[in-house]
Image: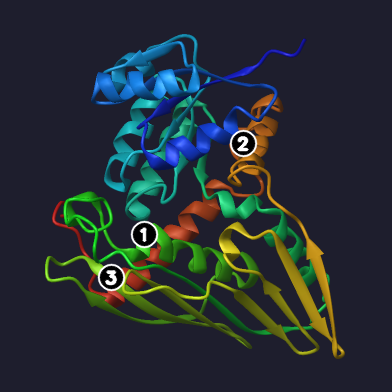
């Protein structure tokens, strides 16, 4: 029987619950440990998912021999330090998006992965969504001609959240851009590459948190209209228009169950329902990389993460989005 890949969980919060719910669906995966700054929270999580080992600090999990790879699911501003400590302990790492607060942090992370000869990938799960994969293949194959326009949004109402929450607390790298704006930016990058010019504007909470950002990415023969916000809901359907047709990724596009092509007056729908919460495909890619001794994914590489961080930095610079802990 093939040896199972043993996972450890850093930060047993909401996203980790969804991730582990999918992880246990994967036949060759086993969750052997979970760590939190609160032993009580770690034990609660361990009890819920029948995980044998719970730790009240991260260092014990870093040193734990019964773990091959760690999933880092803490608030954004802790990603870099925890992932680097994990890699220095010779653990492979899947780190929730954004991989780092800025490109400088992402560069430190990728250099640490190379130095320690371990696998590192940003947990941008939408990259592996079957509907997004299908949409990309259709566009790459020229089904809608040359792309001229892309529209993608991600928004929900969050101004009723506690100001100490990760969404609204500037000390936790709060704001819509890093939390959900990363998705529309990722889609434009995936389908159109690096833009030649970026225009962007933001609105801010009284505590300094960015709560709404609109962006235009300019390309040679195309524009991408992108949006993220906490001030209200949006439709969250992605549209990619070309010279001979359109591709739609159905709401909520970042976790879509289908996509469609509109061409010559007809619509063709591709039903691709996701398994579980949608993390399964990302997990399978990680397992494939580990089994083939790859230190980075060819589908979402270190360079892809660096490029995405550069785009986020560019938007932040234009909009004046900064965090108190940044120098």
For this rendering, which residue is in front, 186 or 175?
A: 175
Identify the residue at horizontal 24%, vertical 24% (top origin).
38
Mark 3 — residue?
Answer: 211
Q: Where's residue 72, x and y in %?
A: 41, 35
Q: State which tag comes first along the sequence, 1 or 2.
A: 1
Q: Report, in whole angstroms, how far the alpha carbon at label 3 lies from the one at label 1.
A: 11 Å
For residue 200, side relative to residue 139 (left or right): left
Q: State which tag comes first along the sequence, 3 or 1.
A: 1
Mark 2 — residue?
Answer: 283
For residue 266, side relative to residue 222 (left or right): right
- Please tell me whether mark 3 or mark 1 is closer to you in this view: 3
For residue 8, side relative to residue 61 (left or right): right
Q: Circle 3 sits in a helix, a strand or a loop, which is it?
A: strand
Label at residue 10: none
Identify the residue at horizontal 66%, vertical 39% (top origin).
285
For residue 91, side relative to residue 131 (left or right): left
Q: State which tag comes first along the sequence, 3 or 2.
A: 3
Q: Is residue 208 above or below residue 68?
A: below
Q: Report, in whole angstroms, how far the alpha carbon at label 3 lies from the one at label 2.
A: 31 Å
Q: Is residue 138 above or below residue 144?
A: above
For this rendering, which residue is in front, 31 or 275?
A: 275
């Amino acid at each position: 029987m093939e040896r199972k890949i043993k996972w450890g969980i850093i930060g047993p919060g909401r996203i980790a619950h969804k991730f582990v719910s999918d992880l246990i669906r994967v036949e060759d995966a086993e969750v052997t440990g979970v760590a939190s700054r609160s032993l009580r929270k770690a034990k609660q999580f361990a009890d819920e998912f029948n995980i044998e080992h719970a730790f009240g600090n991260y260092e014990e999990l870093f040193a734990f021999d019964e773990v091959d790879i760690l999933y880092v699911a803490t608030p954004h501003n802790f990603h870099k330090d925890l992932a680097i400590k994990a890699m220095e302990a010779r653990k492979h790492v899947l780190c929730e998006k954004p991989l780092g607060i800025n490109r400088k942090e992402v560069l430190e992370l990728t250099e640490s992965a190379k130095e320690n000869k371990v696998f590192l990938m940003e947990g941008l799960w939408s990259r592996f969504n079957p509907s997004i994969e299908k949409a990309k293949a259709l566009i790459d194959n020229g089904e809608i001609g040359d792309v001229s326009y892309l529209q993608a949004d991600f928004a929900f109402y969050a101004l009723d959240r506690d100001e100490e929450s990760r969404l609204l607390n500037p000390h936790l790298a709060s704001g819509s851009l890093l939390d959900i704006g990363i998705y529309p930016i990722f889609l434009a990058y995936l389908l159109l590459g690096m833009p030649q010019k970026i225009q962007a504007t933001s609105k801010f909470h009284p505590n300094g948190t960015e709560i709404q950002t609109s962006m235009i990415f300019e390309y040679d023969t195309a524009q991408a209209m992108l949006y993220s916000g906490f001030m209200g809901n949006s439709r969250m359907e992605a549209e990619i228009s070309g010279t001979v047709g359109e591709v739609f990724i159905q709401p909520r596009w970042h976790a879509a169950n289908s996509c469609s092509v509109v061409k010559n007056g007809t619509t063709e729908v591709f039903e691709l329902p996701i398994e579980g919460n949608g993390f399964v495909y990302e997990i399978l890619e990680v397992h494939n990389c580990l089994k083939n001794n790859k230190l980075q994914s060819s589908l979402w590489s270190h360079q892809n993460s660096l490029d995405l961080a550069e785009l986020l930095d560019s938007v932040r610079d234009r909009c004046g989005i900064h965090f108190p802990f940044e120098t």
